[in-house]
């Protein structure tokens, strides 16, 4: 009888367990994941990155950064829908060729203007340089002759740049995009406003002649010499007239009188 009771109890427990289903293990705690970093915007351009990739532009890159022009260019390219930009990039050799102390003699504002002078506010492909209207306006400012004029001419495959101080050439195209074109130039573009020579001083005026006054000369004294000579000759004539009393004496007197009084 006791064995029967135990069997019934076991069966009851088994039936109850099967009705509840299999036991579920507690879920493991989850660790929150950090949001993914946003992908860079398509089409962004970095001027210093373009130059660093090309090489041999370390001095220009340093000046772009120190003057704040690099950030300005990047901001204009990536946050506006303008007509793009053109950058003329001098090589390290071009800066080395400058006269000793040229950069050190410039103030911060002049350095900024110098770098801005290498930037145009429009993207100009190489094929369009023969159609541009000179002088070109750079981001440095005025195109007046004594300020920041920039003249670009194309002769076949060669592009020449004239600042009024230096003549440079475009040696290579470093980068071409929809909004940016970067050219390698063989000289630093020095503008007139910074490196222009002073205009030559006007020539002194020629001395003017004084009217109404004749300068003294030996020629002007000649009449007095003739008068002195005539006087010395006239005195003996009078003596001859008084003492000789003859016809010959009278003729001499008349001849000398003609000399004295003139024709």
Image (cartoon, rainbow, N blue to C red):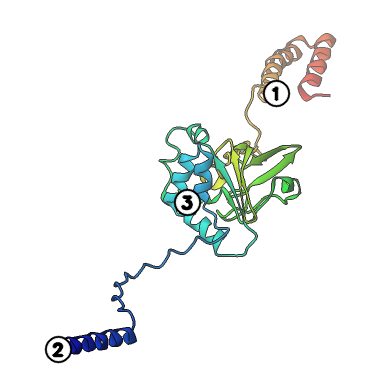
Residue 163 quadrant: top right
| Residue bearing mark 1 | 223
Cβ–Cβ below 8 Å for labels 1 and 2?
no
Of labels 1 and 2, earlier in sequence is: 2
Q: Quick one: SS at disc 3?
A: helix
| Quadrant placement of the N terminus | bottom left
Classify residue 84 as left or right of residue 13. right
Disc 2: which residue: 2
Along the line of sight, the residue nearer the viewer: 24 or 240: 24
Q: Is residue 95 left or right of residue 126?
A: left
Q: Residue 215: where, in percent of width, then height? A: 63, 31
Q: Nearer the viewer, mark 3 or mark 1?
A: 3
Q: Are marks 3 and 2 in contact (CB under 8 Å)?
A: no
Q: Earlier in the sequence, mark 3 or mark 2?
A: 2
Q: Please report the residue visible at 26 percent of the width from the left and 86 percent of the height from the top.
A: 11
Question: Marks 1/2: CA distance?
Answer: 184 Å
User: Of marks 3 and 1, which one's residue comes earlier in the chain?
Assistant: 3
Of tags 1 and 2, the one toward the viewer is: 2
* Residue found at x 71% / y 42%: 153
**Residue 89: which quarter of the image?**
top right
Identify the residue position indicated by label 3 in the image.
112
Q: Is residue 114 visible?
A: no
Query: Quadrant where the C terminus lies?
Result: top right
Q: Are there few (<14), some (14-19), or many (20+) residues within 10 Å of tag 3?
A: some
Whether 40 is drawn above or below 195: the answer is below
Residue 60: x and y, percent? 49, 43
Front residue (pair 139, 62): 62
Q: Secondary structure at mark 1?
A: helix
Q: Where residue 68 is drawn, which disc sits there?
A: none
């Amino acid at each position: 009888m006791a064995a029967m009771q135990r069997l019934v109890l076991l069966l009851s427990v088994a039936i109850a367990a099967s009705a509840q289903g299999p036991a579920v293990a507690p879920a493991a705690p989850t660790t929150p994941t950090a949001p993914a970093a946003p992908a860079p915007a398509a089409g962004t351009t970095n001027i210093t990155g373009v130059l660093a990739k090309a090489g041999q532009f370390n001095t220009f890159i340093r000046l772009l950064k120190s003057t704040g022009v690099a950030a300005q260019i990047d901001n204009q390219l990536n946050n506006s829908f303008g007509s793009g930009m053109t950058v003329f990039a001098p090589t390290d050799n071009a800066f080395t060729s400058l006269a000793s102390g040229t950069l050190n003699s410039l103030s911060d504002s002049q350095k900024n203007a110098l770098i801005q002078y290498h930037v145009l506010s429009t993207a100009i492909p190489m094929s369009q340089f023969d159609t541009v209207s000179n002088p070109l306006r750079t981001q440095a400012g005025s195109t007046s002759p004594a300020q920041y004029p920039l003249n670009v001419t194309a002769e076949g495959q060669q592009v020449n740049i004239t600042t009024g101080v230096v003549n440079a050439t475009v040696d290579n195209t470093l980068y071409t995009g929809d909004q940016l074109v970067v050219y390698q130039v063989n000289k630093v573009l020095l503008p007139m406003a910074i490196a222009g020579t002073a205009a030559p001083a006007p020539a002194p005026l020629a001395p003017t002649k004084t009217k109404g006054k004749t300068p003294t000369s030996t020629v002007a004294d000649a009449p007095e010499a003739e008068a002195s000579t005539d006087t010395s000759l006239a005195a003996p004539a009078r003596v001859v007239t008084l003492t000789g009393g003859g016809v010959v004496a009278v003729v001499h007197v008349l001849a000398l009188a003609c000399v004295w009084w003139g024709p």
